[in-house]
Image (cartoon, rainbow, N blue to C red):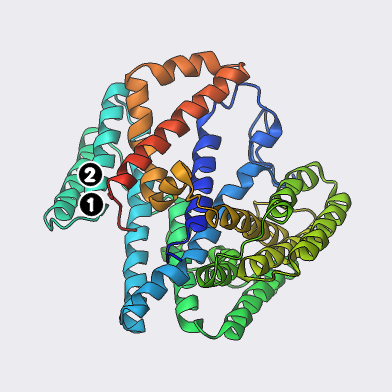
Amino acid sequence: MSKRVAAIDMIRGLSIVGMVFCSAFSWDCGLPAFMFHCQEPPPSYAFSPETRGITWVDLVFPFFLFSMGAAFPAALGKKLEKGVKPSKVALGLVRRWITLVLFALVLGNCGKVFSAQAPEIVKGILVVCLWLALFASLVRTSRPWINPCGYAVLLALFLVEALAFKVEFSLYSPDIIILILAWMALFGGLVWLITRGRPMLRALIFTFILAVKALSSYTPVFDWVTVPSALAWLFNWGFCQYLIIVIPATFAGELLLKDRGDAPVGAAALIPVAAAITQLWGLFTRNVLADFCITVALAFAYALLVRRKAGKSSVAGLAGFAFLIAGIAFDPLDGGIAKDYCNISYLLCTGGMAWLVMSAFTALETRGFNGGILGLCGQNPMIAYTIVAGFVSPVLYACGLLGLLDSLGTGNIFWGLTRGIVVTGSMCLCTAFFTKKKIFWRS
């Protein structure tokens, strides 16, 4: 069995496609509330912290975090198998953290060009140039001069922004998603490295983080713990709560890496997907008790179907049900599941759903499906994440296509969704092209 787990690529690709699609369709086309973040519902799309529930949009980030954690055993384990010392692997994690932090700063400040006083065509050209410079800075290449040239061009373009368009670079404008991923890549990787071969220690670390999250959520005991203002742009204690998703995912990665040939088939492969979909009804409509009962029934049905073949993939499915049921049980304690401000119910439920979806993808993988274009996007996540704003959208606007779809999509669901499909499809095709050409970014 190949060391590369296609199921991880598929769930990572699914999260990226979902992330792009939910931001690419026309928001004012009349789509229902379940097509948006649950706490940013139409028609105002204003953040509503008192709203409880989740939609499919609220799954894209935790699914990506889960895929990151699940990839550690394969990615880091491969280096250890080649004889690389654990200390050097740890140093590599630190270098990756630095790269991602700088990437978050650059990406967050690139978007400031849209606020500049300049013609749209000029801003579009500048954005494409910034993305191409970022591409040159991060691309994996055997030519040592390409990355330094990318750094130089990127710096020159930021100087142009500052001098010609009065756009100021700020440490307090990072891309928050990439910044969180940077810390999860560092902390999650180090936890796996320290606890490899010692699952009980890793489980203890997970339990400690979960306990700290519970204390901070339900008591004021940690209210005094703050980050110095000088470092507030870089770190927030709230980032650590996402380890509740990342650390269990490392167990999933180990299970799937050991044996993926025993994945459930037939109804047993569909039940985890049915359980995940059920949450998008029960937790969104707030039929929590009915949702809990249905999920427990599906868990029992799954356990009965796989009892004679309790392989590694089946264990992953059972673990997913355990996390999901625990997350639903926390819903009333948390006053309802919520992405923001993130609560325990959200972390456990979405982590459990990611386990279940990965279990289903594993069943597909063992039957020869490697994910297709979804897997290709999942193998090249940073290009997929940036190429829409940095290349696809400016080019489609220059061609007049997105401008037309913008006008047609106002109040029209068909054209509003068409806009999302065109942008997302373009991202997928571009990313797949780079992946097939084995062009990847260092991240």
Please state which of residues 178 and 9 is positioned toward the viewer in this rendering: 9
The amino acid pointed to by label 2 is Ala
Q: Which corner quadrant of the image does residue 162 belong to?
A: top left
Please state which of residues 259 and 385 is positioned toward the viewer in this rendering: 259
- Tell me what residue is drawn at x 70 percent, y 52 percent: 266
> How many other residues sit within 10 Å of disc 1, few (<14), some (14-19) or many (≥20)?
many
Q: Is residue 283 found left or right of 260 in the rendered image?
A: right
Helix, strand, or loop for circle 1? helix
- Tell me what residue is drawn at x 20 percent, y 48 percent: 155
Q: CA distance from mark 1 to mark 2?
A: 6 Å
Q: Is residue 358 visible?
A: yes
Please state which of residues 178 and 111 is positioned toward the viewer in this rendering: 178
Helix, strand, or loop for circle 2? helix
Q: Is residue 61 found left or right of 122 in the rendered image?
A: right
Q: Which corner quadrant of the image does residue 126 belong to?
A: top left
The amino acid pointed to by label 1 is Ser
User: Does 412 sit above or below residue 103?
Assistant: above
Where is residue 87? Give x, y as percent: 34, 83
- Tell me what residue is drawn at x 73 percent, y 65 percent: 306
Where is residue 380? Give x, y as percent: 38, 50
Q: Is residue 168 visible?
A: no
Q: Mark 2 highlights which residue?
A: 133
Where is residue 267? Give x, y as percent: 73, 52
Q: Is residue 307 found left or right of 3 in the rendered image?
A: right
Please state which of residues 180 and 383 is positioned toward the viewer in this rendering: 383
- Tell me what residue is drawn at x 40 percent, y 44 percent: 384
Q: Image quadrant for the C terminus?
A: bottom left
Q: Is residue 397 found left or right of 235 in the rendered image?
A: left
Q: Mark 1 highlights which residue?
A: 137
User: Does 306 sit above or below residue 15?
Assistant: below
Q: CB atoms at circles 1 and 2 under 8 Å apart?
A: yes
